[in-house]
Image (spheres, helix red, strand yellow):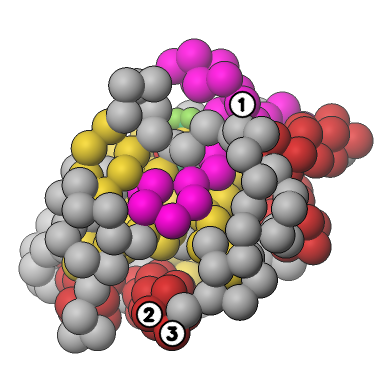
Amino acid sequence: MIVLKSRREIDRMKAACTIVAEILEGLRAFVLPGATTYDLDAYASSEARKRNARCAFRGYHNYPNSLCCSPNDQVVHGIPSKNVLNSGDILSLDFGVVFDDFYGDAAVTLPVGEISETAKRLIAATEGSLYAAIDMAVPGNRLGDISSAVQTYVESRGFSVVRDFVGHGIGKNLHEDPQIPNYGFSGKGVKLKPGMVLAIEPMINEKSHEVKVLNDNWTVVTCDGGLSAHFEHTVAITEDGPEILTRI
Ligand code: MF3
Ligand code: CO
């Protein structure tokens, strides 16, 4: 069941989403060679506390931290560690909070120091596919228009779409209907309506789309060791078009 949100509820979601956006923005300055993802997680936790927001991922199905930190071949759900980041790494950061009963959820992939041309192209393709998808988030379109926009954008640039994980509706729960695959057919799926709020999150691999979960039961990695990137925004569908709630 897809829960539609009123204008007032979307404004409340915007408060949660702005906190997420501010903290992800603040994290950028710390994504440097020599830093650890453990330190990034501590920063995210303390910034959330300052704003009276609860970290959405901590304790979610027993996830141990506030931030998901997924370097290089890690796709999503990487657990913060004391390993240092090195120049040439790429790092996906995924963060969510609950504030005033509503969730916000967003992710970015950032370069550490100087990165390869391939890594730059992968990051640009993933971020570009998110905005191509958001452009389709208008009343009257269908869910498949969003999915297909990601797939077309990414595959035409020679990269591949992760199939085992999807975007999602969001509201008073982190994960609500509908599920949003990053591949599919335009014109198919449920019709988009004002009041739907969607966490659109392309997860894109350099090489094969195949992924596996490590023994920690969280960390998702590419099977072939190729790089992976992830971007996510929480987006409300309104009469006036898409409204990106996790934008500063
Ligand atoms: N953005 C991810 C999602 O929407 C974050 C979930 S991580 C978890 O599924 F730890 F909370 F599971
Ligand atoms: Co999400």
Helix, strand or loop status at disc 1: loop
Q: Is residue 111 shown above or below 6?
A: below
Dot 2 or dot 1: first in sequence order is 1
Q: Which amino acid type corresponds to the residue marked 2 in the rendered image?
A: Thr
| Residue 245, visible in the rendered structure | no
Q: Which amino acid type corresponds to the residue marked 3 in the rendered image?
A: Glu
Q: In this view, does 13 lie to the left or right of 126?
A: right
User: Looking at the rendering, in which quadrant would you find the C terminus?
Assistant: bottom right
Q: Kindly identify which numbered label has been placed on residue 65.
A: 1
Q: Which amino acid type corresponds to the residue marked 1 in the rendered image?
A: Asn
Q: Is 139 or 85 nearer to us in this picture?
A: 85
Residue at image point 28% right, 68% down = 206
In the picture, residue 143 is in which quadrant? bottom left
Mark 2 surroundings within 10 Å by alpha-carbon count, few (fewer than 14), some (14 through 19), many (20 or more):
few
For the residues labelled 1 and 3, the Cα–Cα distance comes to 32 Å
Q: Is residue 238 shown above or below 8?
A: below
- Residue pointed to by mark 3: 117
Residue at image point 61% right, 33% down = 81
- Residue pointed to by mark 2: 118
Q: Is residue 105 left or right of residue 45?
A: left
For the residues labelled 2 and 3, the Cα–Cα distance comes to 4 Å
Q: Give the range drawn in magenta.
A: 53-75
Q: Is residue 186 shown above or below 97?
A: below
Rendered location of residue 82, percent (x, y): 66, 34
| Viewer-nearest of discs 2 and 1 | 2
Disc 2 to disc 3: CB gap under 8 Å: yes
Q: Is residue 63 magenta?
A: yes
Disc 2 to disc 1: CB gap under 8 Å: no
